[in-house]
Amino acid sequence: MMHEKTVVITGAAAGIGLAAARRFAEAGAKVLGLDRNPAIKNISKVIPGFTGVPCDLASESEILEAMKSFQTENIDVLVNNAGINPSPSSLHETTEKVWFNLLETNLTGTYRITKAVLERMQCGVIVNISSILALSGARQNAAYAATKGAIISLTRAMARDHGPAIRVNCVCPGAVQTDMFEEYLKRCEYPELERERIRNAIPLKRLGRPEDIADAVFFLASDSASWITGQVLIVDGGDSA
């Protein structure tokens, strides 16, 4: 299904991005993983068919340079996964520096890499990663939720602009065991109690795994989803039900 297809994944050094890279590579795709973490280069040693390139999505020149690492005329799939949430806070507590940093990475970074990929995507699939916080909101996450809400709107607009040749969909993960989630727990007064509170609030009674989201991304990128575009797929164990 994905044999010899070319896939670009941002934020591929860990978590959801790494799980997605492994899922596509195992299906026979050639994967270009981008991440500002230099460790992305080491992943090439453990995932056949994977090329890891350090790249900061805030830099257009780095994006253009990274794209040269893919020696192919056509890109079949783009997974916009890279995102940050370094200083969760209410809007009143959010500094302009933090606000613009989140916009730069989560939204403008998505714009930059997508624009670069579209120049080499005659037909294909784009899967954007948003968050259930974009749909339900959450305390102390105003800026992050705003950027992820914008990703949903961008998805729907692009689906109309680029169909029928290119399908564009969005995945909204819930509480997934990633580095970002662990960083959130470290900021809590009682991390393990907070972990259990979140887990117990989920109808399926477990936290998500990066592989859960990677499977959803893979489905949307596959021919099994050939009549799905402009849609938001919530993968959260029922937390937002």
Image (cartoon, grey):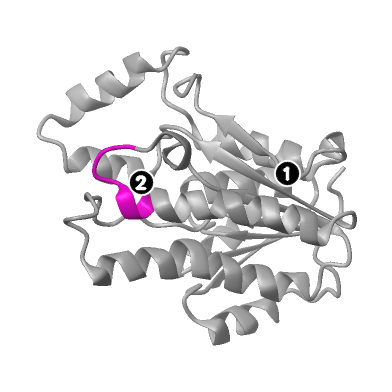
Residue 79 in percent (x, y) is at: 65, 54
Residue range of the region highlighted in magenta in the rendering: 138-144
- Is the residue under label 1 in contact with that under label 2 (CB below 8 Å)? no
Q: Nearer the viewer, residue 157 or 5?
A: 157
Q: Give the amino acid at mark 1.
A: Glu
Q: Residue furthest bottom?
A: 61
Asked whether the viewer can see residue 41, the reply is no
Residue drawn 87% across the image and 40% down it: 226
Determine whether 222 is above or below 5 in the image. Answer: above
Residue drawn 15% across the image and 37% down it: 188
Earlier residue among tags 2 and 1: 1
Q: At numbered mark 1, what does the secondary structure look like: helix, strand or loop?
A: helix
Q: Which mark is residue 179?
A: 2
Q: Give the amino acid at mark 2.
A: Asp
Residue 123 appears left or right of 213: right
Q: Which residue is mark 1?
A: 26
Asked whether the viewer can see residue 183, the reply is yes
Determine whether 192 is above or below 219 in the image. Answer: above
